[in-house]
Image (tube, rainbow, N blue to C red):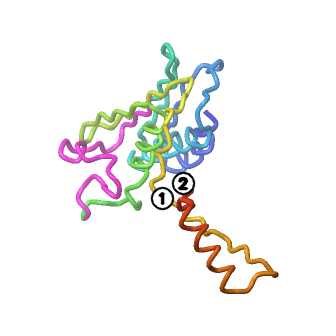
Amino acid sequence: MHCCNLLALKARENGIDLITDAPQDLPVMTGDPRAFKQIVLNLVANAIKFTERGGQVTVVAAVSGSQLTLRISDTGVGIAPDDLKRIGAPFFQAGKTYQRRHEGTGLGLSIVNGLVALHLGELTVQSRLGEGTAVTVKLPLVYTPPQVKAPESKIATLMPVLRQESQDQPQDQAQDQLQDKRQDQPALVKKSA
């Protein structure tokens, strides 16, 4: 919950209560720790950004079976049902632009969505306009990257046959012998990976 400590000042400046509920003995995950930190930072920062002064952001972490469940909920502005269908798409920002009071690129949740997918996890968003939003992320405690077989390269590399001219032979005779050797040998082709 180190990520929440990083955002506690921002929450306090905005007049928002940031509540964390996580057991002290959470197991260590085997995924990318930077990705996990980015997921938490983006989700908690969004919750703080879209919650009004006097509101509350709650971060709960728990282990269920072989998964870590992280739930970030807020009492913020919420997301309209039509926008909820598109939430997480790159550059999409919920709410009409003339109502927008918050800056951003619309990439935060898209990045979270991608990082969760890369870790073979799942992300769900529930929200009601004017009541708040809850984002739940489930990640495997033991991340096993999928075994992807590298595609066989279709690129062929031609290797030139080097001329081996003898100093003793006349130039024409050496070229005739080289020409005879080329006709007897198949073309050398090497596949590169």
Could you tell me which residue is drawn at 70 percent across and 86 percent down?
A: 171
Up the image or down, 117 lies above or below 23; here it is below
In the image, is residue 178 part of the stretch drawn in magenta?
no
What crowding class fits label 1: few (fewer than 14 Cα within 10 Å), some (14-19), or many (20 or more)?
few
**Which badge, 2 or 1, is on the more N-terminal residue?**
1
Point out the stretch of residues depicted in magenta: 71-97
Q: Give the Cα distance between marks 2 and 1.
A: 7 Å
Determine the secondary structure under disc 1: loop
User: Residue 9, image x and y in percent?
Assistant: 59, 47
Q: Residue furthest right?
A: 168
Query: Observer-nearest residue: 65 or 106?
Result: 65
Query: Observer-nearest residue: 31 or 192?
Result: 192
Q: Magenta region's main secondary structure? A: loop
Displayed quadrant of residue 84: top left
Q: Amino acid at mark 2?
A: Lys
Up the image or down, 167 lies above or below 45; here it is below
User: Residue 53, image x and y in percent?
Assistant: 42, 46
Query: Observer-nearest residue: 56 or 23?
Result: 23
* Number of marks drawn: 2
Q: Residue furthest top?
A: 65
Q: Residue furthest left?
A: 82
Which mark identifies residue 19? Answer: none
User: Residue 164, image x and y in percent?
Assistant: 73, 73
Which part of the image, by quadrant, shows the N terminus?
top right
Residue that mark 2 sits on:
191
Could you tell me which residue is drawn at 49 percent across and 31 percent down?
A: 59
Circles 2 and 1: CB atoms closer than 8 Å: yes
Up the image or down, 91 lies above or below 127; here it is below
Which mark identifies residue 155? Answer: 1
